[in-house]
Amino acid sequence: MRFISTRGQAAATLSEAIAAGLAPDGGLYVPEKLPTLSLEDFDGKTSLPDIAATLLRPFFADDVLAPALDAICAEAFDFPAPMRDLGDGTFLLELFHGPTAAFKDFGARFLAACLTRLRAGAEKPLTIIVATSGDTGAAVGGAFHGVPNLRVVILYPDGRVSPRQAHQLGAFGDNVHALRVAGSFDDCQALVKRALNDAELQARVPLSSANSISLGRLLPQMSYYAKAALDHFRAHGETLNFAIPTGNLGNALACILARHIGLPIGEVLLATNANAVLPAFFDGGDYAPHASIATLANAMDVGAPSNFERLRWLVPNDDQLRESFRAISVSDADIQATIQDVWDRHLFAICPHTATAVFALDSLALDGSWAVAATAHPAKFESIVEPLVGAHIAAPPALAELLSRPSRADPVPADYAALVAMLEQAPEQS
């Protein structure tokens, strides 16, 4: 299978697309043609690694990574994505049981397993450069920590991630370098995209991306939606709908792609925080990116969602696109009220991002069975969640161990020259 740019001026193999991150014309890599799978293709497949390998095999066809696909899936997906039944046909798809307690562990670990194989024996180390609004950086740092011939440079907006998120980002050390940028997530993302498009810099410092713009993160994220939908269909004979918190649109797009391929997925409801670029578009307005707004659901503080370009590739007609999805913007006050309500009704806590999807789903009172994508463990946001629920939220063991380490992040301005200077440091100095 070949992969093309959303801007139509580049084509690559899967391995080339994964290694590059961004297409040379500035676009995002997408499959030249989406495969179609039937339910029968998944007969006898029940585990997440087996379902993932079946789902991803057409994308890996004829690629140098194809023989390793089963091993890559087993390596990346060695933790569960359970469904918690909330009653009344509503479920939580818990995606936070990985080593950094966020859904991004799935895609980051898959990408690391791919790049480790692709970079074996390379002359120059590859630098993974990643912008994060909170959770991506920790997942990427954890996935690539200690991997030979690879280093990670994480850019995050100083003061605009939770204290525990910030600590995670700087706690890896070794080949993982955290930079706290004097700016917003959009500033961080713009710096990363500029670096990835800088051919002169790339000649000196080979770069790749691990943001949701990376095909190596997007494709594997289809897998947990596929498993949840298959499990539900096998048990109940009906499609499962999903309500998904979204910032950069990668996680939701993975679910949408899985539906296009043929998985038994019904509606996909998008939930954002006060950064309402997507709700404004789906309500009939123009697509109008703007400076991001700081909210309690900080990992979704995105004013220019990159993967909208892929969504428009999938459904090029804007009117048809608007008819296909709904998007709801959720205020901080409603996030807080939802966290309290879920605690009162079910006696467990959810994170602020998950709360946006719970609120969106409750506000629409939709028919059918729905799963909310629970994107992060609430203990990552204890300063927000604990005062609302009046209880201590214990960190899972892997997160607690990471938080016990010393943490360091270097301050940098939102300035491209400063970033280039950092990237050109020798790997052992980073």
Image: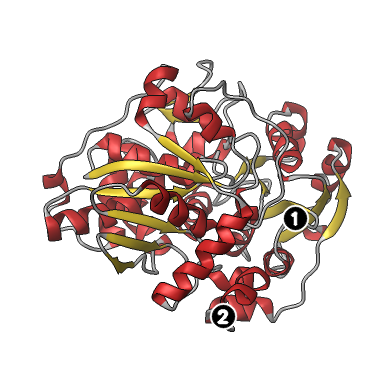
Residue at the location (29% across, 48% down)? Answer: 241
- Residue of label 1: 160
Quarter in which the N terminus is drawn? top left
Q: Nearer the viewer, residue 192 or 173?
A: 192
Q: Position of residue 266 (x, y in %)?
A: 26, 42
Q: Percent position (x, y) of residue 21?
A: 57, 37
The answer to whether residue 109 of the structure is visible from this angle is yes
* Side of 69 where 379 appears, left or right: right
Residue at image point 46% right, 54% down: 359
- Is residue 289 left or right of 419 when viewed as pictured? left
Is any part of residue 377 visible from this angle? no
Residue type, label 2: Ile
Q: Tell me the element at label 2.
A: loop
What kind of element bears circle 1? loop
Quadrant placement of the C terminus: bottom right
Looking at the image, residue 422 lies above or below residue 109: above
In the rendered view, would you say 142 is above or below 127?
below
Q: Is residue 281 above or below residue 79?
A: above
Snapshot colouring: secondary structure
Q: Residues within 10 Å of mark 1 (few under 14, many from 20)?
A: many
Q: Nearer the viewer, residue 47 or 385?
A: 385
Which numbered circle lies on residue 118? none
Amino acid bearing label 1:
Arg
Residue wearing tag 2: 393
- Residue at x 44%, y 23% (from the top left corner): 313
- Residue that appears at 33% across and 49% down: 365
Give the x, y percent position of residue 377: 52, 69
Locate residue 360, reporting x and y percent. Answer: 45, 49
Q: Viewer-proximal residue, 90 or 101?
A: 90
Cα gap from disc 2 to disc 1, whole angstroms: 21 Å
